[in-house]
Image: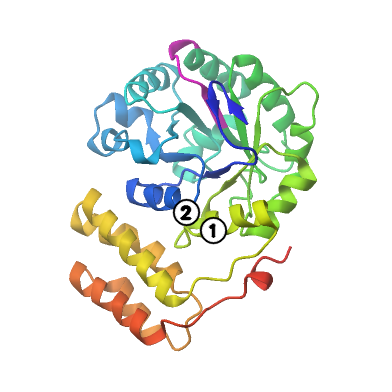
Amino acid sequence: MKIGNITLRERPLFLAPMEDVTDTSFRLLCKSFGADFMYTEFVSSDGLIRNGDKSIKKLNLLDEERPIGIQLYGHLIDAMVEAAKMAERSEPELIDLNFGCPVKKIANRGAGAGMLRNIPLMVEMTSEIVKAVKLPVTVKTRLGWDENNINIMEVAERLQDAGISAITIHGRTRAQLYKGQADWTLIGEVKNNPKIKIPVIGNGDINGPLKAKEMFDRYGVDGIMIGRASVGRPWIFREIRHFLDTGELLPEPTVAEKADIALKHFNLSLRYKEGLTAIYEMRRHLSNYFKGIPHFRETRLKLLTSTDANEIKSIIMDIKNKWGDLRTGDNTSVYKL
């Protein structure tokens, strides 16, 4: 698969951009488990051009996590163009435009999925950014604003004409947020549209190997993007890649293995973020790392409320010692379609 001048393996796996999730520590971890391509957290164009500290820090990339794309969002063309130029100086492999985030405070300002209500502006903004940078420009978007305004085919064709190098489609409308099932039928129709020459990456409800293979086989997408199912479960990339390559389902990691991974993740988070920020942003991962352990409520509460790094590490080690050999899930049932 090629995105502009970037060559990836066949059936590549992408880590979706997620705010307060796909930071440096998590990207490094997912890379170690076989993610083929990753993205930064959402980067605000307004934050960048105003030299906001949080936005600027998101442009810090490591060679170990490449290939990687910087994802930008905003509703003003001039700000987005300037932000794209700034992002380009960090030398990512590509610039990705967020036309899919459904969060109210972003979409209602006309950014993210809000762009789906103003296709001419979306196309003009994309065209101007493509002209302003030398890197490939890609887009992540949704099927439409709501069920009465599903316009993904028009959007894909017009964005391709504007010069993008690939498109990622989340199989829901903005109105759906993350509810209901993702509609991959429409993603497949875009992929099989003879007018579409760029790679089409599918996103939505990929929760394991069986679902990933089914989407590749049924809809012919060029790549698959994995988001929420990777949170606190970075080994999902290893599981999917192994199944795609061999047809064999790997066993669920033991609690001891998960504890080792969680500890490595936490140490990376502490390395790249300030202490309390690292702790707060690790909580959503830690709540998933140990799902399914019986009689875990008291330990879970301690794990997710402590603000002491050493105490958190000690709790993780206690979990490993107490439940180490346990496997909390059966992959063959977890991944049923």
Whether the magenta-drawn stretch holds residue 133 is answered as yes
Give x and y (percent) for residue 236: 54, 58
- Given residues 227 and 127, the one toward you in this image is 227
- Crowding around mark 2 (Cα neighbors within 10 Å: few <14, some 14 to 19, many 20+) is some
Residue at 36% x, 68% y is 260
Question: Which amino acid type is shown beneath numbered disc 1?
Answer: Ile
- Crowding around mark 1 (Cα neighbors within 10 Å: few <14, some 14 to 19, many 20+) is many
- Given residues 233 and 288, the one toward you in this image is 233
Magenta part of the protein: which range? Answer: 131-139
Q: Which residue is mark 1?
A: 236
Give x and y (percent) for residue 173: 65, 43
Q: Sequence-wise, which precedes: disc 2 or disc 1?
A: 2
Give x and y (percent) for residue 204: 63, 49
Mark 2 in CB contact with mark 1 (< 8 angstroms): yes
Give x and y (percent) for residue 152: 70, 32
State how far apart marks 2 and 1 are (Cα): 8 Å
Q: Which mark is residue 147?
A: none
Question: Which amino acid type is shown beneath numbered disc 2?
Answer: Phe
Q: Which residue is mark 2?
A: 33
Give the vertical position of 170 relative to 230 (above or below).
above
Residue at 44% x, 47% y is 31
Q: Secondary structure at mark 1?
A: helix
Q: Could you tell whether 42 is left or right of 119 in the image?
A: left
Residue at 19% x, 71% y is 310
Q: Is residue 180 visible?
A: no
- The quadrant of the image that shows the C terminus is bottom right
Give the vertical position of 73 relative to 274 (above or below).
above
Give the vertical position of 291 relative to 276 (above or below).
below
